[in-house]
Image: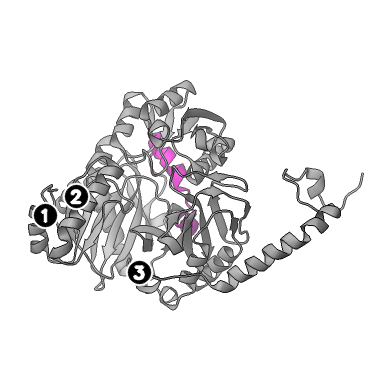
Amino acid sequence: MFKKILIANRGEIAVRIMRTCREMGISTVAVYSDADRNAVHVLEADEAVYLGNSDPADSYLNIAKIIAAAHETAAEAIHPGYGFLAENPDFAAGCEDADLVFIGPPASVIRDLGDKTVARRLMIDGGVPVIPGMTQTKSNPDKMAHEAEKIGYPVLIKAAAGGGGKGMRIVTSPDEFKTACESASSEAAGAFGNDAVYLEKYLAKSRHVEFQILADCHGNIVQLLERECSIQRRHQKIIEETPSPALTQALRQEMGQTAVAAAGAAGYINAGTVEFLLDQENRFYFLEVNTRLQVEHPITEMITGIDLVKHQIEIAAGHPLTLSQKEIKGRGHAIECRIYAEDPENDFFPSPGRILFLKEPKGPGIRNDSGVYSGFEVPVEYDPILSKLIVHAENRDLAIQRMVRALENYVILGVKTPVPFLIDILKSKAFQDGDTFTDFIPAHFKDWRPELADADIARIAFIVDAVTASQRINNRVQVSDSFASPWATLGNWRM
């Protein structure tokens, strides 16, 4: 087993990986930029290496610097987390060339599955159902338009590389095709350095259902049940749950077996996710494989009791899987809400800035994977995710209730967050009925605004605080900027 692992990431995912490493007795190395000098992941690590300024190209995307940091600290392996270099085949290959273990699939697998048209061809050859569409990219909008006519509108223009909703456009008629194609290609070039796009048939009112898989280098592959990720904004997930309210046991078993077949067809090793679209007739189609740990992996951990990061590390160290398919059972229901620094009233535009106060929810069945604290400056340079709030309960209704209570007790001041928006989604009849589709937010919450009552209470609290400030100072009741000492937190005591 490894003695030391470098985590080539930041924020909550770096912290989450470090905590498993600590349980396994493995030392950790953090890397950081100027913006993250005082970040939680830097404080949690055993060692930390400065990479450069806050520009991702000079820090978290700089392969040479990260590999040098691993050598400098005598790390034996690198865990990429998700985002940044996690799905970059050149990074995986660079680790291999530098005699470092990349905790993820081989570079060749990342390269094949990272190109969605290549992945589609692999799945077709492996007998996995795919969405009707192209298996080759084209650069000429006129030729693409001809393909769209053959597929039939509406169509979805997709970037061949990358993910996260970048380079995607839904086109409903020929009149808007050329502009949408050029826009998608341009966005893909900026996001992934690759402007290649292709077309798929757009499936209206479809569900996004994915299966977690683990595969070792000894030929063993298991699936760890499904996650429903249909609640999305700008093609990016914000609420995930497991099990899916749409799946029967027979359909779950069929999709799980198909996910294992997809992993086998790709020669997959380590943790990954096989994503499907499920249409209104319960027909499912291969969407893509995410060649990394998913943001939503904690809900799988909650219902199965399996630490996915631990298994990632063990697989990367060459150990065979210690899990059999028969052993993997789900218990209860889990939901995850992603907490971003963003403004849901302004098309979810990022809301960077200083967190003035933070109070995390606590209680039975609540887990909060966080990478921030009171006083932390949320940088403008990176994805604005602050934390992942996860709950687990006996059934879906209880899990929804628990998540609503947890969100209502989650206080983040100084930056805008979607917490009130998430509460309204969870309380909606459509969500509670399990009527969740990828167009859920535009269908039900397109013009969402928060209840004014909460804002009124906040204004009153501000006025009361301002009026009583001088009295509190006179009575010496002001709050200290420093952390409370142990003596102040012990309660009533005497020596």
- The image position of residue 317, as x and y in percent, is 41, 34
Instruction: Specify start and end residues of the magenta stretch as a single range.
Output: 299-321
Amino acid at pointer 1: Met
- The image position of residue 304, as x and y in percent, is 46, 57
Residue assigned mark 2: 197
How packed is label 3: few (under 14 Cα within 10 Å), some, or many (20 or more)?
few
Residue assigned mark 3: 442
For marks 2 and 1, the one nearer the N-term is: 1
Q: Secondary structure at mark 1?
A: helix
For marks 1 and 3, the one nearer the N-term is: 1
221 shown above or below 433:
above
Instruction: Calculate the distance from the C-alpha at mark 2 to the C-alpha at mark 1.
Output: 9 Å
Residue at the image point whose x is 62% and y is 51% from the top: 356
**Residue 144 numbered mark, or none:** 1
- The image position of residue 260, as x and y in percent, is 28, 53
Q: Nearer the viewer, residue 65 or 342?
A: 342
Residue at the image point whose x is 67% and y is 68% from the top: 460
